[in-house]
Image (cartoon, rainbow, N blue to C red):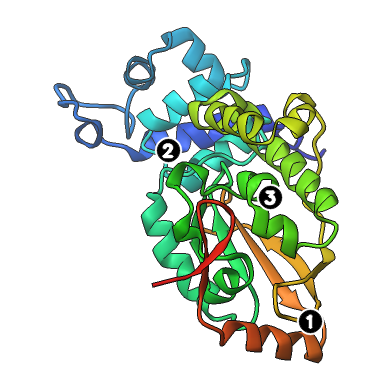
Amino acid sequence: MSTPTPGPSQELGAFLRAHRELLKPADVGLTATARRRTPGLRREEVASLSGVGLAWYTWLEQGRVTASRQVLTSVARALRLDAAGLRHAMRLAGYHEPVASDAEPGGLAAAVRPVLDSWPTSPAVLLDRHFDLLAWNAPWSALWGSPESVPADRRNLMWLMVADPRLRTVLHDWEPLAMNIFQHFRAQAGPALGDPRTGELYHRLAEDAPELRHWWSCHSVAELTARSVTVRPPGSAPMTLSLSSFHPVDDPSALVLLFTPLTEQDRVRMTALCERPLRAVAPDGGERQAG
């Protein structure tokens, strides 16, 4: 007779128990006062550190109860799980949305920036889970204008898509892409839709683009789809770029957008654009030479 395959609840319980048994009291700031018959922390110690009852935590390890995202995060913190461990625990508990990383944004930007710079003719940008711009390459600045000229609280892809005059001018047929980006943001944000930064962004968008207020109040979601986009930079012939996206391994809640010239002619035109003096977006939506 074959052995039944454990379900997700049992797998989660086994995962938590394995990490509990790997920890020593000193690892979590406790003093070992008596000889222990089993390795690792006791269940009551994990329960106390997590702020939950002993019986409930015992049932969690036995696969008899489910945990909310908040409680599971507390348990993971008590067990000293890293970001990958937390993501795995969340998936086993049925929470499939990306889990925000505890990694410092500056550290992630420093790690990903050399990757962005390796595409000398393809505009690329690194976004955090709020779609704030963390890093970008020279082609991105050449095509859309330098993000450094935009106030920090507006240095956000959704805000740029709807409120930056240059971007609206350069991007042909911008509305389908702008809507898709907003729908993807909602899908990725999930339970984080109520956090302060998201609320600030929605308020800023509604204030700066009131004609699109209905976008902010709708609840439609969608994945960000690969597509071809046409751009028409001032003083340059039109170019067709292929949009693709991926999540960095270090932080699956972050996102990299890459615009690759579709043809050799498009690549030549993008190269010429990148060789021009960098133009920055002025506060009034016009352009000025950077530096």
Mark 1 / mark 2, whichever is N-terminal: 2
Direction from residue 215 to residue 258 in the image, left or right: left
Gap in angstroms between the C-alphas marked 1 and 2: 58 Å
Q: Determine whether 34 is above or below 123 in the image.
A: above
Point out residue 168 in the picture as x, y percentages from the top left corner: 73, 55
Q: For mark 2, give the secondary structure.
A: helix
Q: Amino acid at mark 3?
A: Met
Amino acid beneath label 2: His
Pointer 3: what residue?
161
Quadrant of residue 260 in the image?
A: bottom right
Look at the picture and state if 17 lies above or below 281: above
Answer yes or no: is residue 61 visible: no
Quarter of the image where the N terminus is located: top right
Vertical side of 245 occupied by 117: above or below: below
Residues 93 and 180: in front is 180
Residue 65 position within the rendered picture, expressed as x and y whole percent measured from the top left: 62, 15
Point out which mark residue 13 bears.
none
State the residue position of label 1: 237
Of badges 1 and 3, nearer the viewer stands: 1
Task: Work out whether mark 2 precedes mark 3 in sequence or the reverse, and give the earlier one.
Answer: 2
Secondary structure, mark 3, is helix
Residue ID at (58%, 51%)? 252
The amino acid type, in three-letter code, at marker 1 is Ala
Q: Nearer the viewer, mark 1 or mark 2?
A: 1
Q: Is residue 79 above or below residue 126?
A: above
Residue at 51% x, 49% y is 155
